[in-house]
Amino acid sequence: MLSRIDPEVAKARMKPPKITALKQRKAWKKGISIGVMSFIALFYLFPLLWLFDTSFRPKVEIFNTPPRILQAPPWVTFKSYSLASFKLAVNRYQMNQGFLNSVLISVCGILLTLLVCSLAAYAFALLRFRGRNFLFYCILATMMLPATTMLPPLFKVIQSYGLYNKHLGLILLYAASAFGVFLLRQYYVRLPVSLIEAAIVDGASKFRIWWWIVLPLGKPALSALAIYQFRHIWNDFLVPMVLLRSRELHTLPIKLQVMDSVNVAKDYDAIIATGFVAIAIPILFFLIFQRQFMEGLSGSLKE
Amino acid sequence: MSSIALFRNRRLGSYFRFAKIEPYLFILPFFALIIAFNVYVYISGAKLAFTDAQGINPGEYIGLANFKELISDTQEFWPAIARTFYYTFGCLLTQIPAALVLAVILNSTIFGRFRGVLRASFYVPVLMNTVVAALLFRMMFLRDTGMVNWLLGVFGLPSNTNWLYESRLCIPLMIVVSFWQWTGYHMVYLLASLQSIDPVIYEVAKLDGASPLRTLLQITVPLLRPALTFVAVMSAIGGLMQFEYSFMLFPNAGFGPGKRALTGIPYIYYHAFRSDFRLGYATAAGWILFLIILIFSLIQIRFMGLGKADEIEF
């Protein structure tokens, strides 16, 4: 009898205090580390929070020190919120136009990249032709040729094509993405062969196989490439600045540069509002598609 | 590749002939673009570097004069290259260790589900436009109204440094902005690699009584060496090609006081499109910079192999 109860009694007597003490210590440790790291993260993100906050504030409150948001409780300082900065950016600098240009170039650039790269990647991954490996290595080699080191000849070449000061020139330039072909090809070679074989038996042409099987199956790789291209095109600054001259063609980053090039009485409120728009879009996408953003990185693209 | 064998079984002669050229049609659009916008640009760059082209004047062949001028230019060009390296290695030496420490901290199980939130918040600056980041930090570094001087004042430190007009501070300021923006990027990559390390190794180290520092230096770092090399090389290439911080961080697009923020790519841009429009001369400078970057690209291939490149970005 006693031996049957004994272990439980022993447990009840010996362990509980120890476990709670340990648990408490662990909980403390956890609370403190989360607290400290949250504080560091908040401090780290403070410039961004400041930008978000300030873009809704009147010009006089922008350069308050301490920052206006820290001066009083939020419900007091939020009273001065308005859209005045955005209106100024739109009315004086046509920020809305810049936004539309950025959207247009990004959307067209991404779609064209996906189309062109996926066609090429499909051929390199699944078709057999003379010189395939050689041509693929050539593509890989072009990945080592950055555009910005050859800025003057790029400018001249685009000019000679008649694409200077045109959105189309930039879109075509972005679509020539060797990295895109590489990324998609690495995914396509791992596609299940059985489906493709079945399609061939059914008499599907190569083009139909690409359109009906490879494209849908390769969606994860396509979305990874789309995100990569979006970040690249949306944030690109130097090349569009060199290739677009007219005001009405400028993208958001160039609008920012134009606003900043006013030397006297710089409209910092318009700059902040435009900056807000320029970074809010990628951050919004990131919050929605966070899984896809991180996927390409952790190698899960490879399955 | 068995799928391709099946294509060949078609008996139709005309189809067979078409099938031979058909794959080339699939790669044609891409090749047309990459040749027109990448390869041809480099080819015409090879010609342009040997001319005295200026503005709309196409220029004439002048041999190696541009390169000779660059190599003997100890006033502007070599200091610009030196600054490029200063900036690049400054970024490397601050960001990689910080990213590693941050990744190791976030990798600890103590954060549980909170890890995702922390990781995301350190990653958000990566998504930012570099132009916006530069402008934002400029506003923070302004002498009278900036947040940095205010914060220093709060802690009783000297708070009237004119950060943006101090030529000694140009590159360090750019390193600071770069640190803020890109550490999270490296951290996310290192964190992903850390999570693939077998936790048993750490259990064993703990049982053997290894200190956290020793665990970091003798277990984590060696196991992460491929990831660290990769991140370092990518960061170095990014640093060598940096443009926006030089151009936008300092007021009036002047590349900092006394042009002390003028690094490699800004040097090309400045000479080709801002000051004297010497396209040939700027192209020659571009070739020198390209060769430097190429060395790093080759190191990357040597150590990593190209197969690694699909795990990067984002």
Image (spheres, grey):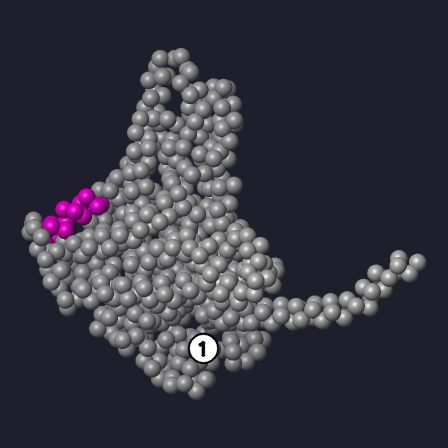
Assign a secondary structure to mark 1: helix
Residue at 52% across / 27% down in the picture? A195
The quarter of the image holding the N terminus of chain A is bottom right
Provide the chain ID for the residue under circle 1.
Answer: A
Left or right of B26: which side holds B280? Answer: left
Q: Is residue B150 above or below residue A133?
A: below
Q: Which residues are magenta?
A: B41-59
Residue at 24% across / 55% down in the picture? B292
* Magenta segment includes B50: yes
Left or right of B272: which side holds B60? Answer: left
Q: Where residue B22 sits: x, y (%)?
A: 35, 25
Q: Nearer the viewer, residue B303 or A298?
A: B303
Can residue A252 be seen in the rendering of this structure? Answer: no
Q: Is residue A120 above or below residue A159?
A: above
- Binning the other alpha carbons within 10 Å of mark 1 as few (below 14), some (14 to 19) or many (20 upward) gives some
Q: Nearer the viewer, residue B41 or A74?
A: B41
Q: Where residue A209 sits: x, y (%)?
A: 46, 27
Residue at 36% across / 30% down in the picture? B26
Q: Nearer the viewer, residue A287 or A25?
A: A25
Going by the picture, which residue comes out furthest to the bottom? B156
Going by the picture, which residue comes out furthest to the right? A1
Can residue B69 be seen in the rendering of this structure? Answer: yes
Give the residue number, with chain letter if any, for mark 1. Answer: A61
The amino acid marked with disc number 1 is Glu
Q: Where residue B80 sits: x, y (%)?
A: 22, 65
